[in-house]
């Protein structure tokens, strides 16, 4: 989605992110950085922005294609791996719960992840991109209608709301000797139910663990770790099987939107079938009936 560079100063490593042109506005990036500074101030385990000598986090770069924005971030300790242990999954749950404690009721001047932005608009964009109806798009239309009703009927009283990461999975966190978790890449942060992050992590966990017994063990440890820090309400638990389906619908539309900058090497009808296949696997695992 963006261009990342490793920056080294002696033994110290940093990451310099250069946002692709016209991907994020200046104010959207500033809000992402405001969230990260807030989380760092509350001792949460996140990669944080580093200011220049004049105290500015955001750099403006006159690239050949036009103005782009750059930000220097701290380097997350540890390594990235999809094959982490149940104990590491427990620690990821703990770390995410701590982030959520500080993110709850922290409002961003960015996108709010609701039915319009997660389902209605994305399905229209997906249909426009593929420019014809096929079985996968028909499925997404039915799924969108089903999830819209489900979300609109939520009892919001026991649903925690605030700033969400929306892309919490192994690719956006580092594990340091299976003792410390550091989250990074808050590029998709916005306002929404905090359980969106929990559900999305579980979805990606199933997608990367074909052995369902191993998945369930890691999922149980993740949820137990989370609840050692803060409780997940019954309403949130009931919503977990559905939230990630809305998020994934949104991300399919993002792939369509970013075809010229990112996805044109893999985005085609076969890719859409694979994406929908993952949704159907999750639906079958949770015995969800959308018809």
Image: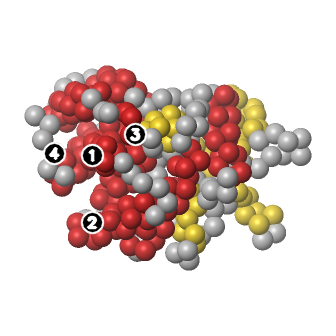
Residue 31, by quadrant, is top right
What residue would you read off at disc 4? Answer: 288
Which residue sits at x=10%, y=34%? 291
Q: Earlier in the sequence, mark 3 or mark 1?
A: 3
Cα–Cα gap, marks 2 and 3: 24 Å
Residue 142, by quadrant, is top left
Cα–Cα gap, marks 4 and 3: 21 Å
Cα–Cα gap, marks 4 and 2: 17 Å
Which residue sits at x=32%, y=37%? 246
Which residue sits at x=68%, y=34%? 30
What residue would you read off at disc 3? Answer: 159
Determine crowd level at label 4: few under 14, some 14-19, many 20+ residues with C-alpha closer than 10 A.
few
Nearer the camera: disc 2 or disc 3: 3
| 67 is higher (above) or lower (below) than 279 | above
Q: Residue 60: image x %, image y %?
A: 76, 34
Please indicate, yes or no, whether residue 64 appears anywhere in the rendered image: no
Count of numbered circles in the view: 4
Please indicate whether residue 216 sits to the left or right of residue 232 in the image. Answer: left
Which residue sits at x=68%, y=29%? 26
Nearer the camera: disc 4 or disc 3: 3
Q: Residue 216: image x %, image y %?
A: 27, 66
């Amino acid at each position: 989605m963006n261009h990342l560079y490793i920056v080294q100063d002696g033994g110290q490593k940093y990451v310099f992110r250069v946002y692709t042109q016209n991907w994020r506005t200046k104010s959207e990036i500033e809000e992402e950085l405001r969230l990260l500074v807030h989380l760092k101030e509350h001792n949460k385990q996140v990669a944080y922005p580093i200011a220049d000598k004049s105290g500015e986090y955001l750099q403006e770069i006159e690239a050949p294609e036009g103005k782009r924005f750059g930000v220097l971030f701290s380097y997350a300790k540890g390594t990235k791996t999809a094959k982490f242990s149940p104990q590491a999954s427990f620690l990821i749950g703990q770390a995410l719960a701590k982030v959520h404690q500080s993110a709850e009721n922290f409002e961003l001047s960015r996108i709010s992840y609701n039915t319009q932005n997660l389902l209605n608009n994305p399905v229209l964009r997906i249909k426009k991109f593929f420019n014809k109806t096929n079985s996968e798009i028909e499925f997404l239309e039915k799924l969108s209608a089903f999830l819209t009703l489900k979300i609109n009927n939520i009892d919001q009283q026991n649903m925690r709301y605030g700033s969400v990461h929306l892309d919490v999975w192994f690719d956006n966190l580092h594990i340091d000797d299976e003792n410390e978790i550091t989250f990074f890449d808050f590029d998709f942060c916005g306002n929404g139910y905090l359980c969106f992050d929990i559900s999305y992590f579980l979805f990606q966990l199933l997608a990367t663990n074909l052995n369902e017994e191993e998945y369930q063990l890691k999922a149980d440890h993740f949820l137990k770790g989370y609840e050692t820090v803060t409780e997940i309400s019954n309403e949130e638990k009931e919503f977990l099987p559905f939230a990630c389906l809305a998020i994934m619908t949104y991300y399919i539309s993002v792939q369509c939107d970013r075809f010229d900058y990112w996805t044109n090497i893999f985005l085609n009808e076969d890719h859409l079938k694979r994406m929908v296949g993952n949704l159907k696997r999750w639906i079958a695992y949770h015995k969800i009936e959308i018809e």
